[in-house]
Amino acid sequence: MSLGPTPIPADPTALHPMPGQPRVVQLKPLITSGLIEAGEYSYYDDPEHATEFETRNVLYHYGPERLVIGKFCALGTGVRFIMNGANHRMDGPSTFPFPTLGGSWADHFDLLTGLPNRGDTVIGNDVWIGYEAVIMPGVRIGHGAIISSRSVVVSDVPDYAIVGGNPARLIRTRYEEADIARLLAVAWWDWPADHLTRHIRTVMSGTVAELEAAAPGVPPKS
């Protein structure tokens, strides 16, 4: 008996995955910086500057902290990641970073060492970040979270949470705590691409139980 044509996954190496839409770029084939990591299929949408993501959307990235973006993330136009290089001293009369402008001022570069550093900024898998949202340094956003447009995210976001505002606050969670644990255990974003392709409809519109039943290695019901 024929099972029909073999499902073909989308190409994770295509810079512009949508024909005729250069405004959409997949981040993994775009990124060149060793300090930025993006998982497969995560994309950024920008009608004017999509391919300039590393310089226009990741700001003050003087290192060594990293920006890590998981798989299957959707980033709206104008999303900004503020990195630790944006920090200034605040313990003296002036916050101005004199040594960065050179001349003999550079002799005082020690005044810029030891500034607060919150470490890597980490975005989980299947995260949707809305238009012009700002993610502050060292924030960790959980799997399946949604960040509302123009939010300013200053603290960690739990898995499957929806946050919004300035500063961003929890609006609600997408699932009950027990179901979130089940979703994290299933971790569909780690499924082999061919298996995922066969179960796209379940991933997008199924129940938690249906997703569990579709997981690799789960025997079909007789």
Image (spheres, grey):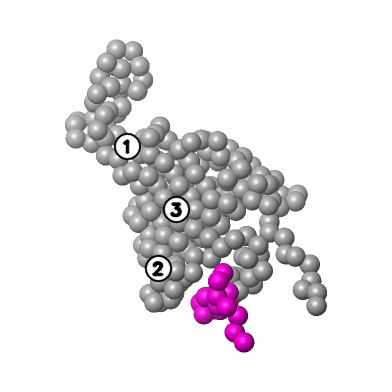
Circles 3 and 2 in contact, beta carbons < 8 Å: no
Dot 2, crowdedness within 10 Å: few (<14), some or many (≥20)? some
- What's the residue type where badge 2 is placed? Ile
Q: Does the magenta stretch include residue 208?
A: yes
Residue 148, can we see it?
no
Give the distance between the C-alpha atoms of the residues marked 3 and 1, in whole angstroms.
21 Å
**What residue is disc 2 on?**
171
Residue 20 in percent (x, y) is at: 75, 49
Give the distance between the C-alpha atoms of the residues marked 2 and 1, in whole angstroms.
29 Å
N-terminal-most mark, 3 or 1: 1
**What residue is disc 3 on?**
123
Give the distance between the C-alpha atoms of the residues marked 3 and 2, in whole angstroms.
19 Å
Nearer-the-camera pick, 3 or 114: 3
Nearer-the-camera pick, 34 or 84: 34
Residue at the limit of the structure toward the bottom, as seen here: 222
Write down the quadrant of residue 159 in the picture.
bottom left
**Magenta span of residues:** 205-222
**What residue is disc 1 on?**
87
Q: In this view, does 39 lie to the left or right of 24?
A: left
Nearer-the-camera pick, 139 or 5: 5
Write down the quadrant of residue 92 in the picture.
top left
- What's the residue type where badge 3 is placed? Ile
N-terminal-most mark, 3 or 2: 3
Residue 198 in percent (x, y) is at: 67, 69
N-terminal-most mark, 2 or 1: 1
